[in-house]
Image (spheres, rainbow, N blue to C red):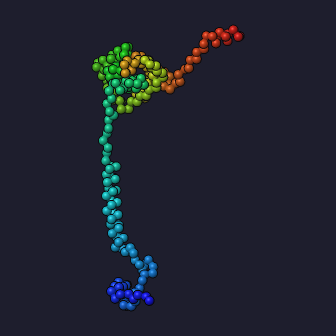
Amino acid sequence: MSAEPSTESAAAAVDTAPVDGSGGAAVLPRTERELNAPSPLTLSFLGVVFLATFVPWVAAKVACNGREAPVRQPPELSLDILARQPKDAALELQQRAATGRYGEAAELARGDVARELQEAEARCQTEPAPCKELRARADSTTTRAVLVGRGPLNAEARVESQIGDKTERYVLQLRAEGNRWFVTSRVPYAEPLLTPVPVIRLTPQGSAGAAQSGD
């Protein structure tokens, strides 16, 4: 025997059931158009939330990208760091000399090279025009170096500087003193910077004598 619904449940179902406009039986929506969800008001609220989030994000992104970043200067390195490796020492000396800073370049040299650089620095005091021209081009002067060979206490490197339309190349001999490398010879180099180093093949005397006796 089925249970009969209570009076309260029946009354609530009657109150909440949708009815048509004529006061007849409840009409349930059968299509999305009849359901009408989400309503235009809900869509309007979602659009407002989107604009309130998207517009500030775009404004912040444009403001961040449009701001000029501060110019960062390269850190000043000590001479101990610049002269720790022979290639670095050769590169630094040539860059300083190519930009007219002969006195600073002499700090990385020994012997005749140091004396020549100091004399060039003295000429800058009496004839400042050439040195000022080189120093004015410091930002556009580029230098590169190639380590040709290295031993425990000696090394050889090639350097090339591009000063405007002029190109300078040198072969540098370096010597180690403590934890630093210093340039002891600086000779102009006419060949391309990356010219291969000739390979010297040594033949033992015993092998050479055997070859001659066999002939």
Question: How many badges with numbers are in the image?
Answer: 0
Query: Would you identify the image quadrant in which residue 140 lies?
Result: top left
Residue shown at the point (44%, 19%) measured from the top left: 152
Quadrant into which the N terminus falls? bottom left
Report the residue at 28% width, 20% height from top. 125
Horizontal side of 213 relative to 114 (left or right) equals right
Residue occupying the point 63% across, 10% down:
206
Q: Give coordinates of residue 48: x percent, y percent.
A: 32, 66
The residue at the far left in this view is 125
Please say if 3 is above or below 192: below
Quadrant hosting residue 166: top left
Visible residue check, residue 120:
no
Judge left or right: residue 57 versus residue 206: left
Which residue is at the front of the view, 102 or 153? 153
Residue extending furthest right? 215
Instruction: Report the quarter where the C terminus lies.
Output: top right
Q: Position of residue 168 (x, y in %)?
A: 43, 24
Position in image of residue 172 (x %, y %): 43, 20
**Foreground residue, 123 or 4?**
4
Q: Residue at x 50, y 26 (%)?
A: 194
Q: Quadrant of residue 135?
A: top left
Rendered location of residue 137, percent (x, y)? 35, 30
Tell me if I can see residue 149 in this picture: yes
Position above or below: 142 against 28:
above
